[in-house]
């Protein structure tokens, strides 16, 4: 080859490792925080009708007006707040970062947390500062405030509840971060349906706050739809970076109908929360295993040898997430997504066999 990409590609991109998605064929799939339940039959029929009626020859509605209306009405977005849609909330993290990526600008986030905050900082040429959580995986407000004052981040990302720890950070600690931040604070509520706590109402009080949600963990991962709510002054600027038709027509039509019926999806989320409690009890009863209390649809736990346990589970056709090696505080940690009661039983049996 006459051209060497390494001469032209940015060195920090050459050093990156692409986001890995495991092959899950024929596996009990408990690795990606998906809702294990299919859409109820009547909603599937309705979705099929919407797909059949969609004008596939036309570009989508760039403003997603009907979806916007449904979300505002059903998901508690306060009066005065604006909404910006992303092709998954991952895209919104990227748009926010792109808008703020002045030379030398910083993204700050607690660690361990969602890996895309760090990756996207790299994509956009921004500095990244990770502030360690406490040993219990709670937010360390003194350390957060100190590092915020030191680094003056353009944006602080906080996953609430946090991924991969499942912890729901203390409200007073969060308030201290909000007051100390000199720039934007984005509270990423990807696991809102399982948490029973939200900062959405706080949008009325904090002009530097954005609240982000996604439909992915609620049962609609395939649609790729996230949104961020906040002051129009921020979102009008970030919206300029959005590619014109980022939310396709099928997603808009189906999501509008399902948001109108969000109670049905919340009922599935409630069943998952019940299963989470049962799964947590079963794990807590196992010897040599430490678990952290979760407010999301997954559970983080530590075993004596995570790579080995992960492999033994995989041989039994159970796929979870191995976090060993991803962050020093996650040594020998594994993360399991809450499945159906049947899937959870298969996982628990396979885990007992793997630890024996
Ligand atoms: C899963 C997840 C997301 C990404 O969700 P998409 O909308 O599917 O892109 C964002 N933030 C956190 C913390 C997540 O765990």
Image (cartoon, rainbow, N blue to C red):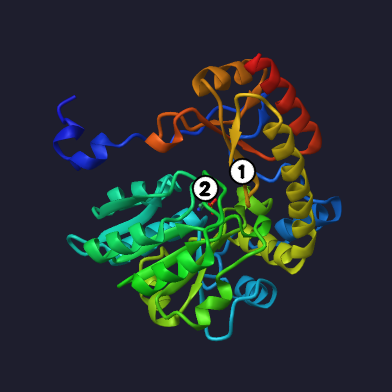
The answer to whether 212 is drawn above or below residue 117 in the figure is below
Q: Which residue is mark 2?
A: 163
Locate residue 66 relative to residue 208 in the image: left or right: right
* Mark sitting earlier along the chain (2/1): 1
How many C-alpha atoms fall within 10 Å of the one at disc 1: few (<14), some, or many (≥20)? many
Q: Nearer the viewer, mark 2 or mark 1?
A: 2
Locate residue 95: give its quadrant: bottom left
Instruction: Give x and y (percent) for residue 132.
Output: 37, 48
Look at the numbered disc 2 and say if its residue's Cβ is closer than 8 Å to ligand 1: yes
**Residue at the spot 77% in from the left edge and 38% down from the top edge:** 340
Can residue 244 be spotted in the picture?
no
On the image, the x and y values in percent for residue 109 come to 37, 55
Q: Which residue is mark 1?
A: 33
Q: Give the image location of residue 119, x and y in percent.
A: 35, 46
Instruction: Name the residue at 31% across, 61% down.
Output: 98
CA distance separating discs 2 and 1: 10 Å
């Amino acid at each position: 080859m006459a051209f060497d990409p390494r001469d032209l590609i940015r060195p920090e991109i050459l050093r990156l490792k692409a986001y890995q998605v495991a092959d899950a064929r024929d596996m009990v799939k408990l690795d990606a925080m998906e809702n294990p339940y299919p859409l109820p039959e009547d909603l599937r029929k309705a979705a099929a009708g919407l797909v059949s009626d969609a004008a596939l020859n036309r570009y989508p509605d760039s403003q997603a007006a009907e979806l916007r209306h449904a979300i505002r009405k059903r998901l508690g977005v306060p009066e005065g707040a604006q909404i910006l849609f992303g092709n998954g909330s991952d895209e919104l993290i990227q748009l926010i970062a792109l808008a703020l990526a002045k030379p030398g600008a910083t993204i700050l986030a607690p660690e361990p947390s969602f890996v895309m905050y760090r990756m996207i900082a790299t994509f956009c040429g921004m500095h990244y500062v990770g502030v360690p959580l406490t040993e219990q995986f709670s937010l360390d407000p003194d350390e957060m405030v100190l590092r915020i004052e030191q680094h003056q981040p353009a944006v602080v990302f906080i996953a609430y509840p946090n991924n991969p720890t499942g912890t729901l950070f203390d409200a007073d600690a969060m308030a201290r971060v909000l007051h100390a931040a000199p720039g934007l604070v984005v509270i990423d509520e990807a696991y809102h349906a399982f948490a029973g706590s939200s900062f959405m109402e706080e949008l009325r009080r904090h002009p530097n706050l954005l609240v982000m949600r996604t439909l992915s963990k609620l049962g609609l991962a395939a649609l790729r739809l996230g949104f961020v709510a906040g002051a129009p002054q921020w979102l009008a600027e970030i919206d300029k970076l959005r590619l014109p038709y980022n939310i396709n027509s099928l997603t808009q039509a189906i999501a509008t109908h399902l948001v109108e019926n969000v109670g049905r999806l919340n009922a599935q989320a409630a069943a998952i929360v019940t299963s989470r409690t049962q799964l947590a009890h079963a794990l807590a009863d196992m010897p040599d295993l430490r678990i952290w209390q979760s407010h999301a649809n997954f559970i983080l736990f530590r075993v004596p040898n995570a790579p080995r346990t992960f492999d033994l589970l995989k041989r039994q056709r159970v796929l979870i997430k191995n976090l060993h090696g991803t962050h020093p505080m996650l040594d020998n940690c594994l993360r399991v997504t809450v499945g159906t009661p049947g899937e959870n039983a298969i996982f628990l049996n396979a885990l007992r066999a793997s630890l024996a």
